[in-house]
Image (cartoon, rainbow, N blue to C red):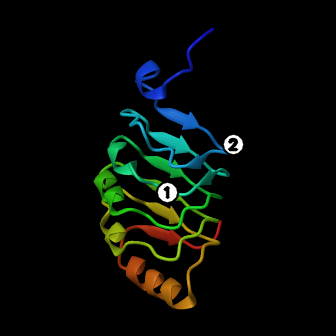
Amino acid sequence: MNDPVTLSSDLPNLQVLNLANNKLQGNIFQPTLVYIRELYLRNNSLTCMDGIGKHKSLQRLDLDSNQISSIPLEIMKLSSTLKQITMNNNLLNHIPYQMTNMGSLESFSVGRNNFTSGEREYLIKLFSSSPVKLYFSN
């Protein structure tokens, strides 16, 4: 009988991981995948992003169609690497204003979430003076 694969120790140089369209629940960001550049987690049942800041090489993060309600400030630890985030169809009702200062972030998609019209207008204004392109639809 073979032991299950542990991504962080058995595949330490993994750079692209696609776990989309599964039934993953809870938090997937433990343990840390040091060299991961692209992480595709769309269409699961993930509820949080705790630990995301430890993935220092991450450039693309796809979290569409999950159940995530908040973005932790630790995402700012990825300011120099993260280029694209897609979080359409989640439960977000707020985005940390600090994300406008993420130096490498180019694109941030947050369509079909729980933003009030006031929060949406605030975010459009906030991100309009930022190099980050904020998208409210696909």
Q: Is residue 107 left or right of residue 52?
A: right
Looking at the image, tell me whether mark 2 or mark 1 is earlier in sequence order.
2
Q: Disc 1 designates what residue?
A: 48
Q: Residue lying at the far bottom in this picture: please name it.
A: 118
- Point 48% across, 48% down: residue: 60
Dot 2: element = loop
Q: Position of residue 99 (x, y in %)?
A: 36, 67
Q: Is residue 138 above or below residue 50?
A: below
Residue at (67, 52) in percent of width and height: 43
Q: Nearer the viewer, residue 95 or 47?
A: 47
Measured as percent of width and height from the top left, residue 84 is found at 47, 55
Residue at the far front in the pictured view = 1
Q: Give the distance between the C-alpha atoms of the residues marked 2 and 1, in whole angstroms.
A: 16 Å
Q: Identify the amino acid type marked 2.
A: Asn
Asked where in the image residue 123 lies, by quadrant, the reply is: bottom left
Q: Using the image, tell me which numbered label, if any, was put on residue 22.
A: 2
Instruction: Using the image, determine if residue 60 lies above or below residue 31.
Output: below
- Side (left or right) of 133 relative to 40: left
Q: Position of residue 137 (x, y in %)?
A: 63, 71
| Type of amino acid under label 1 | Cys
Q: Nearer the viewer, residue 54 or 59?
A: 54
Give the image quarter of residue 13. Answer: top left
